[in-house]
Amino acid sequence: MQPNSDNPKLLGITGDSKPQVPVFACIVYVRKNKDATVFGRVANLAGIEASGNSDRDVLGKVTREFKSRVFKMFEEGQEIPWVDPPQPPLENEQVRSVPVHL
């Protein structure tokens, strides 16, 4: 069998030697506007929102900002100001949960 970098067992990476990658849930509320644009806001970290032409566009924008902010705070040892619990979505909003790896 040929070595495969996608299979950590073949690389001898097991148990505690496996790299620890922090993962955070970015909870986003999205809605379609009457003009067919999409608006999204992060529910569990205040102050991150974006507009775009599609859900994908908006999710990309907010998750990049989410990752940037969380990474900076995490690296500096700051406490992350989570909104916990987040406010419930508005009637016209849909919930998206995006796992974000630092």
Image (cartoon, rainbow, N blue to C red):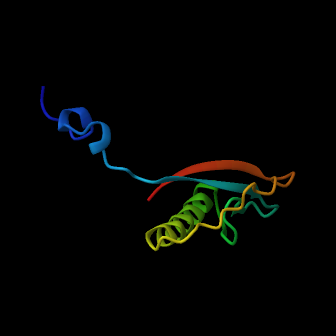
At horizontal 65% and vertical 67% (from top left) the residue drawn is 81
Where does residue 72 sit, x and y in percent of width and height?
48, 72
Where does residue 85 sit, x and y in percent of width and height?
75, 54
Relative vertical location of residue 92 with respect to residue 37 in this rendering, above or below? above
Relative vertical location of residue 45 with respect to residue 97 in this rendering, above or below? below
| Farthest residue, direction top | 1
Q: Nearer the viewer, residue 72 or 94?
A: 72
Number of disc labels: 0
| Farthest residue, direction left | 2
Where does residue 14 sit, x and y in percent of width and height?
27, 36
**Residue 55 falls in image quadrant:** bottom right
Report the quarter where the C terminus lies: bottom left
Q: Is residue 7 visible?
A: no
Relative vertical location of residue 44 with respect to residue 65 in this rendering, above or below? above
Q: Nearer the viewer, residue 32 or 50?
A: 50
| Farthest residue, direction right | 91
Report the quarter where the N terminus lies: top left
Where does residue 46 sit, x and y in percent of width and height?
70, 68
Relative vertical location of residue 13 with respect to residue 80 in this rendering, above or below? above
- Does residue 46 appear left or right of residue 4 in this picture? right
Q: Is residue 42 visible?
A: yes
**Residue 63 falls in image quadrant:** bottom right
**Residue 84 falls in image quadrant:** bottom right
- Does residue 54 appear left or right of residue 4 in this picture? right
Q: Nearer the viewer, residue 15 or 70?
A: 15
At horizontal 79% and vertical 61% (from top left) the residue drawn is 33
Q: Nearer the viewer, residue 14 or 2?
A: 14
- Does residue 93 appear left or right of residue 5 in this picture? right
